[in-house]
Image: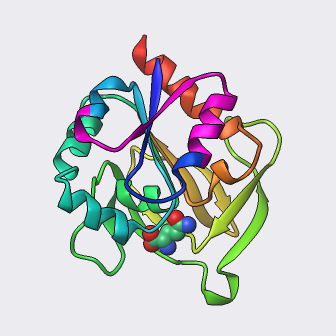
């Protein structure tokens, strides 16, 4: 089993370290063909507009939509959450559009550009410290979407079937429980 990390832009190396710390093989995905070699894919944090520009340049978007349709799990963190959302506040168009949710970018305001906060997450026993950096939040979700965590009444982590998304950056801490949670999803999907 292998987990890919989309390596167009953003916190790629940190996710690879976290996947390997969980005892799993990680692959940085730089070319469309490499998507065929992995059983699950992480879309990292970074800048969603920059990622989208590179996706368009290398024609990645159709391949990512196919990956989503194939039933293989995907996990988006921060900018990656934005890529997975079906609707974005203030934008006509979404990107991969796999999760039935409306996401607002940079939604925690300027004075709180980055912060850390303990979160209670469904399926994870003890509180988990979320690192938020110019983070998006989920404004609303469709009926199939399970809300896994909130911060001050704002939804910051969701799951819809094989898709997982978080507003924060689990790869920027050495607490690998969320990466392990995603790896479990990939194992289940493979069965
Ligand atoms: N604000 C960024 C965006 O809109 C996301 C920030 C992040 O990934 N840390 O893509």
Q: Residue at x 30, y 33 (%)?
A: 35
Q: Does residue 153 sit above or below 188 in this rendering?
A: below
Could you say where residue 143 lies in the image, as x and y percent from the top left? Answer: 39, 48
Residue furthest to the right in view is 126
Q: Residue at x 57, y 39 (%)?
A: 16
Answer whether residue 87 is visible to the viewer in this image: yes
Closer to the camera in the image, 148 or 44: 44
- Boundaries of the magenta span: 14-33
Q: Residue at x 71, y 57 (%)?
A: 130
Closer to the camera in the image, 140 or 52: 52
Q: Is residue 158 magenta?
A: no
Place residue 113 in its image quadrant.
Answer: bottom right
Place residue 126 in its image quadrant.
Answer: top right
Answer whether residue 137 is visible to the viewer in this image: no
Q: Does residue 142 sit above or below 91 in this rendering?
A: above
Could you say where residue 62 lies in the image, as x and y percent from the top left? Answer: 16, 47
Tell how many labels.
0
Judge from the rendering whether residue 91 lies leftward or rightward of residue 177; answer left or right: left
Residue furthest to the bottom in view is 111
Could you say where residue 11 lies in the image, as x and y percent from the top left? Answer: 54, 55
Could you say where residue 56 lies in the image, as x and y percent from the top left? Answer: 19, 61
Judge from the rendering whether residue 165 lies leftward or rightward of residue 84; answer left or right: right
Q: Does residue 97 sit above or below 33 in this rendering?
A: below
Q: How is the image coloured?
A: rainbow
Judge from the rendering whether residue 103 lies leftward or rightward of residue 121; answer left or right: left
Q: Residue at x 26, y 67 (%)?
A: 53
Quadrant occupied by the C terminus: top left
Judge from the rendering whether residue 87 lies leftward or rightward of residue 112; answer left or right: left
Q: Is residue 20 magenta?
A: yes
């Amino acid at each position: 089993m292998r987990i890919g990390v989309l390596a167009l832009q953003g916190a790629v190396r940190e996710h690879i370290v976290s996947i390997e710390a969980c005892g799993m093989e990680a692959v940085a995905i730089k070319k469309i063909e490499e998507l065929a070699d992995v059983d699950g894919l992480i879309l990292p944090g970074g800048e969603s507009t920059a990622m989208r520009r590179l996706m368009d340049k290398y024609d990645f978007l159709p391949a990512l939509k196919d990956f989503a349709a194939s039933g293989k799990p995907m996990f988006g963190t921060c900018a990656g959450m934005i890529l997975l959302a079906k609707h974005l506040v203030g934008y006509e168009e979404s990107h991969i559009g796999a999760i039935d949710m409306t996401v607002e970018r940079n939604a925690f305001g300027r004075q709180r550009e980055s912060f850390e906060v303990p979160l209670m997450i469904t399926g994870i026993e003890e509180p988990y410290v979320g690192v938020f950096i110019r983070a998006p939040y989920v404004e609303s979700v469709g009926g199939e979407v399970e809300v896994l965590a909130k911060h001050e009444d704002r939804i910051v982590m969701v799951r819809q079937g094989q898709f997982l998304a978080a507003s924060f950056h689990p790869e920027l801490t050495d607490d690998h429980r969320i990466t392990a949670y995603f790896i479990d999803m990939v194992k289940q999907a493979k069965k």
